[in-house]
Structures are given as structure tokens and as C-alpha cells.
């Protein structure tokens, strides 16, 4: 937790000395008020000293409508922050600790926009949601907004033929169907236009494409195109090539941050208020973990390398409730994810594609904290302009790229202080 690590008592009789000791830097401040039942005042600010003066200095004219806590303030606690992300995360943690019932309103924090495939339904569909539940659903996100998620979903679902309607499927041959079935854009399970096996196969294609951020679909089209070319069926190869181009254009609209939540592993790098220090904020399975502070001025004289420190910090255990499958830590994903060909667990129907799909992709754990963390990360990632840098984990963490990014983040401030001839700090 990012603590408010500085503080002092407030004495109205010596307010000039009090204000003089406060830093004129961005941060988060907490004013503790007199009285056991009185709630504190919490705020973020671009200037801690100026904010304290506005709240605690004697008003020049009376009466004034401006909030003044001079006569009730007992103590101030604050934290100087070096980036907006550190400031936002500090404010969130402090608000959650002091105002557990209304911190969402104080932070204006909304659940993130996600895409969900409801795998428990006999005929699943893909739609936009802001609720994460332990309902064996498949979730991918977060997106910048609900509108952005819907825009991607509309183009993405055009590549497949799963249903988009919200009706209960009864497989009634007398049912007239919807406009998507008339345009041959849906397999039409509502009037038994397809078998259950055909629909399950199409749902599996949708989920696998989303889980691999499009790689499963594009690789399939590439193989089909190569096979058609090898068979000298150039007309078929041209058709598949157009489908590949269409799919690639749609998938380019998928943001880098939007991926299966259980596989959302990243690290956010930000400058801190300390000199030559970088804060690394790990994101594991969508959860924000404890930050690491890389103090390069101290590390230059220590035998440990920065890469070793990053390896240890990024290998920290992920919360047990983060995954869909039971009790996993670093390097221990579910057996179904690690070995897609593994047999279903006891109680699952062998050969049942719906049951196997839920076992492999379904989410069986949900936490209110997860939605908060995803919202904080999405708010930072989609901000314009965005401070800092982010790196995602693929097969392994890109340590070398992370170290080079630390050098880039530190170089501008050092260059402005020491002149253009000074080289960037060694990492």
C-alpha cells in the first residue's frame, strides 16, 4: 500500500511556519480533524502547500463560502507523488481505507467495459458488460468505454455466425428468426437452423480467437490460403486472402490492454518524486500488485542487478482468487490452460465441448477489487496524453526493454539538470 509517509501537527497560532514546511509539489493529502467520530478530508492536488493554505489559512473576508478547516484540523498527512498514476493509486487506496462505503463516488470509479461470452448458456452469445461474476463466463478487456467495446464487438462478430439476440432459444422451426439469420450472418439456432454441435464449434472459434487476441483466426486463414495456393486453387486462395484482410482490419481495433483478464500481466513504469527512481507497478491477472521502487542512485553501488530485482518482484504470488481455476501462483496456471489436450476434471462430461470450454476458459472467481484495479489501469492506459510506459508479458517478461524504458524515463529530467552533454543513467 502506498502510505502517506509525511505528516505534522497543525497549530493555528504558528500557521506560517507550518505552511513553510510543506512541499509545493503534487501529491495526496489527508487532513485529520478533531473528534473521534469526525471523518478526515482527503484530496489529490497539484501543490500540497497551496492546497493546505486554501483549507487552513485564516479567511481574509468573512463570511466566505470557501471550505475552511482551520478551526477543526488537527494534523496533516501527505505523500509527494511523481506521476498521475501513483497519485491516483494512492488516492484510491486511502479512500478505500477511510471511506469504504463511498470511495467509488469519491474516485468517480466505474466498472470497466468488457466483452463477455456467457459459456453457461446452451447457445452462448458475446456482449458488452461492466459486471465480472464467478459464472464460468469468458471475459476480455478492459476497453476505453462501452462505446469502444461495442464498436469492436460489432465488427468482430461479423466474422462469425453466433447469435446476437437476447431471446431464449427454443429451437422452434416455426419461429421466423431475426434479420441476422435472414442475411446468413447467424446459424439461427432459434428455428433449428443448425445442430448443437455446429453452434458449439462456432462458439469455440470465437473464444479461441479472443483468447489469442486474434492469432487463432488469422493463422487459420493463412494455412487455408497456403493450402489453396499449393493446390493451385488461386480463386479459393484469393477469397481466403480477402477474409484474412477483413479479419486483420477488425482485429487491429483491439487495444493492447484488452485481453483475457486472467492473462492480463503487465508492468507500468513511472517516475517518482525521488531523484533517479522509477516505480514499477506490476499487474498480474488484472490485479495491481505492490509497486517496486528502483532507486538507481543506490543500486549502482550494490552487487544485485536491476534485472534480478525485477525478476524477484514480478515473480510475486498472484492472489489465489484471481484465477478461474483453484489455487494458482506464478507459473501454475490451470491444467486446462497449460495443457489444452488434458482430460476434463472429475465431474465434467468427457467429450462435451461446452463443459470442456467452461473448464478451460470459464471464470469461477470474482472480486470487487478486481473491477477497481481494472478501472484504474484502463483510466491510465487510455488517457491522452499518457505518462509512463507499459510492457506486457508474453512467454516471459521483456526485461531488457523494461530497463531501456527506465533509462528513457530518467534521461529527460537528468538532461535538463546537467546539460545536454551528460549521458542518460546506466541501468
Image: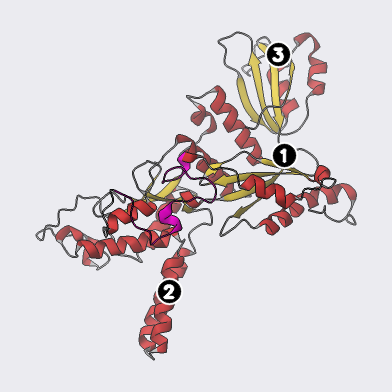
Magenta stretch holds residue 368: no
The secondary structure that dominates the magenta segment is: loop
Q: Residues within 10 Å of mark 1 (few under 14, many from 20)?
A: many
Tell me what residue is drawn at x 30 percent, y 64 percent: 202
Q: Nearer the viewer, residue 96 or 333?
A: 333
Q: Nearer the viewer, residue 127 or 275?
A: 275
Q: Is residue 163 visible?
A: no
Q: Which residue is mark 1?
A: 82
Q: Quadrant of residue 199?
A: bottom left
Q: Which residue is mark 3?
A: 61
Contact, mark 3 vs mark 1 (Cβ under 8 Å): no
**Of the numbered discs in the image, which one, if any, rests on residue 244?**
2
| Magenta stretch in the rendered image | 321-346
Q: Position of residue 287 (x, y in %)?
A: 53, 42
Tell me what residue is drawn at x 35 percent, y 84 percent: 236
The local secondary structure at tag 1 comes to loop
Q: How is the image coloured?
A: secondary structure
The local secondary structure at tag 3 comes to loop
Camera-near label (3 vs 2) is 2
Q: Residues within 10 Å of mark 2 (few under 14, many from 20)?
A: many
Q: Is residue 373 visible?
A: yes
Q: Position of residue 115 (x, y in %)?
A: 40, 51
Left or right? Give the position of 295 relative to 418: left
Placement of 280 over or under 183, stated as above or below? above
Amino acid at each position: 500500500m502506498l502510505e502517506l509517509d509525511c505528516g505534522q501537527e497543525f497549530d493555528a497560532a504558528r500557521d506560517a511556519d507550518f505552511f513553510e514546511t510543506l512541499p509545493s509539489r503534487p501529491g495526496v493529502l489527508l487532513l485529520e480533524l478533531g473528534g473521534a467520530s469526525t471523518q478526515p478530508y482527503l484530496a489529490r492536488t497539484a501543490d500540497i502547500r497551496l492546497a493546505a493554505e486554501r483549507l487552513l489559512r485564516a479567511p481574509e473576508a468573512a463570511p466566505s463560502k470557501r471550505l475552511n478547516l482551520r478551526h477543526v484540523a488537527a494534523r496533516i498527512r501527505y505523500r509527494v507523488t511523481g506521476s498521475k498514476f501513483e497519485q491516483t493509486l494512492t488516492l484510491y487506496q486511502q479512500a478505500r481505507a477511510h471511506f469504504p462505503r463511498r470511495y467509488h463516488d469519491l474516485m468517480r470509479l466505474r466498472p470497466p467495459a468488457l466483452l463477455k461470452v456467457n459459456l453457461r448458456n446452451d447457445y452462448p452469445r458475446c456482449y458488452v458488460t461492466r459486471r465480472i461474476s464467478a459464472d464460468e463466463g469468458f471475459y476480455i478487456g478492459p476497453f476505453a468505454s462501452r462505446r469502444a467495446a461495442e464498436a469492436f464487438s460489432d465488427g468482430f462478430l461479423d466474422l462469425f455466425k453466433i447469435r446476437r439476440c437476447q431471446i431464449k432459444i427454443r429451437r422452434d422451426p416455426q419461429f421466423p428468426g431475426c434479420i441476422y439469420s435472414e442475411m446468413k450472418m447467424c446459424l439461427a439456432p432459434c428455428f433449428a437452423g443448425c445442430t448443437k454441435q455446429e453452434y458449439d464449434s462456432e462458439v469455440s472459434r470465437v473464444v479461441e480467437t479472443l483468447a489469442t487476441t486474434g492469432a487463432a483466426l488469422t493463422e487459420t486463414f493463412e494455412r487455408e490460403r497456403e493450402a489453396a495456393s499449393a493446390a493451385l486453387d488461386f480463386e479459393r486462395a484469393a477469397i481466403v486472402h480477402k477474409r484474412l484482410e477483413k479479419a486483420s482490419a477488425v482485429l487491429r481495433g483491439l487495444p493492447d490492454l484488452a485481453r483475457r483478464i486472467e492473462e492480463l500481466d503487465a508492468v507500468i513504469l513511472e517516475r517518482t518524486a525521488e531523484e533517479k527512481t522509477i516505480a514499477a507497478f506490476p499487474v498480474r491477472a488484472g490485479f495491481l500488485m505492490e509497486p517496486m521502487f528502483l532507486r538507481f542512485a543506490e543500486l549502482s553501488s550494490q552487487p544485485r542487478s536491476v534485472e534480478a530485482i525485477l525478476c524477484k518482484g514480478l515473480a510475486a504470488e498472484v492472489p489465489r482468487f484471481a484465477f478461474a481455476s483453484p489455487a494458482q501462483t506464478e507459473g501454475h496456471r490451470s491444467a486446462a490452460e497449460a495443457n489444452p489436450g488434458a482430460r476434463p476434471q472429475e465431474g465434467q462430461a468427457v467429450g462435451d465441448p461446452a463443459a470442456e470450454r467452461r473448464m478451460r476458459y470459464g471464470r469461477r472467481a470474482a472480486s470487487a477489487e478486481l473491477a477497481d484495479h481494472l478501472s484504474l489501469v484502463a483510466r491510465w492506459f487510455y488517457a491522452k496524453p499518457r505518462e509512463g510506459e507499459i510492457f506486457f508479458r508474453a512467454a516471459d517478461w521483456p526485461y531488457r526493454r523494461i530497463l531501456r524504458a527506465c533509462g528513457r524515463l530518467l534521461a529527460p529530467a537528468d538532461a535538463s539538470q546537467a546539460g545536454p552533454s551528460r549521458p542518460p543513467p546506466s541501468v
